[in-house]
Amino acid sequence: MFDLIIRSDRVVTPHGVGAHDIAIQGEKIAAVGAYGSLSPTEGGRLIDASGKIVIPGGIDPHVHCKWHVPNVDGTAGLSDPPDVVSRAALHGGTTTIIDFARWTHGNTIQGTIEKRDQDWIGQTYCDYAYHVMVEGALPPDIFGQIAETIQAGYPTIKIFTTDIRPSTRGRMVDFGDIWEVFKVLAAEGGMGVIHAEDNDIVMHMYDKLIREGRVAFENMAEVHNTLSEDLSFRRIIRLAEQVPGTALYMMHVSAATGTAAIREARAKRLPIYGESLHQYMLYTSEDYKRPNGQMYHTYPSLKSQQDQDALWAGTLDDTIHAIATDEICCSLATKTQGVRIDDTTGGNAAVEPRVSLMYTEMVEKRGYRLEKFVDLVSTNAAKVLGLYPRKGAIAAGSDADIVVLDPGLRRTLDAKELHETDYSPWEGREVAVWPSLTVLRGQIAVEDGAFHARPNGQYLPRKIDPSILNGGTKL
């Protein structure tokens, strides 16, 4: 009856932490029973994970595979493709990643998705989905396309409120067009996923610092600053408030000001959700001064210790709901090629250690409950972004995506032992656990460091639950 049984005295389920047997049949969890109560069928297997922590597969809701990376000489390259990133993800206990399909002018959204599929189908080891990105001045016919896209199972629409850098103008969507997008989102059950910085402030600070000769990347926090996050978060949330039913997922929250804006919106029962990155949770702008300090950077910039403290507080009061990576996997040479505020490469090679790092920082160092840790690295992203309960839960009927975290594998992170690229921004950090087993849809993907997965990751059509769109309840 059961192909695989995973048994442990610490299994994190939607009902809490307990001693359970998890029965897997095919790609699904068939049952969750009392410890020792279930047995595999003949030819099946029992894995005793007693003394270890069993969690649903991690979900990284913000990655960029095979992504445009500008070079300082005016050319451009691509970040590493899905096969590299998804392999690393599985080694680290992440079984689902969400990337982006970037619409550009002269194309249709359907064509954009079909082209993006060519990068992914048959070339990824873990399961995946896309946020659909729109940019620049939006043509009148795009709004109908967005409606069709949401109904087709792509409900999250990415919008920039800034061009980010002077050399990447054309990303920003103006507020009139954002208003029109929000009307579509509210009508069709979609969600805006927002990169929110105030473009006037950001571009003013680029001009100011370049004029003053303070162009070194160590000054990045002055450009992508807390005032910018404050103004843009509040403006975009206010706009959403004027279109009842608009739900927003605020990506890579980096500052106390953004955290406060989300908190205030949620106090008004608005469906606004916050994502931060583990870079922001563990590094500050002071780390830019370290050797190869570009390693720690992504956009928006790292901020102060006070901002970091606010992010941690936000994970505890229903303000920050998910911890992502903003993954851009590239070589150290590419990551550190830019040395100025206007040419530093964003993103990080970070998808592999995320789960273990967050366990260490949350559970071991800060005393978070296991349930809260799982919420932040898996379950909340599944709930908010339309994957739950297929993903993010150890429950009967859910996909059998299961990770065993082993305290006996405590280690110091070493880029040479990871599976992404030739550097890691987490080099030298100690983690209290490491996955000894990663199961994806019932198949053992990684066991004791040996990789067994095949490139048969599935695309995940999504529909956001009305309770998420309506807001008001704690996750």
Image: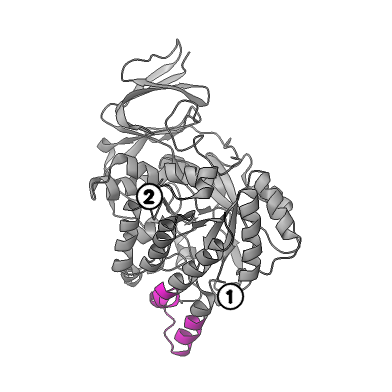
The residue at 31%/71% (across/down) is 286
Find numbered disc 2 in the image and state the secondary structure of the residue it sits on.
Answer: helix
**Quarter occupied by residue 424:** bottom left
Q: Nearer the viewer, mark 2 or mark 1?
A: 1
Whole-percent x, y for residue 86 in the image: 51, 44
- Magenta stretch, main secondary structure, is helix
- Tell me if mark 2 has few (under 14), some (14-19) or many (20+) residues whose alpha carbon lies within 10 angstroms of its own: few
Residue under label 1 = 167
The residue at 46%/25% (across/down) is 396
Q: Is residue 176 left or right of residue 353?
A: right
Q: Is residue 345 above or below residue 454?
A: below
Tell me which amino acid carries mark 2.
Answer: Lys
* Most foreground residue, 235 or 391: 235
Magenta-colored span = 204-227
* Most foreground residue, 377 or 68: 377
Residue under label 2 = 416
* Most foreground residue, 406 or 447: 406
Q: Which residue ends up furthest to the top in the rendered image?
A: 42
- Tell me if mark 1 has few (under 14), some (14-19) or many (20+) residues whose alpha carbon lies within 10 angstroms of its own: few
Q: Is residue 257 magenta?
A: no
Q: Is residue 177 above or below residue 39?
A: below
Tell me which amino acid carries mark 1.
Answer: Ser
Residue 73, can we see it? yes
Whole-percent x, y for residue 130 in the image: 59, 49
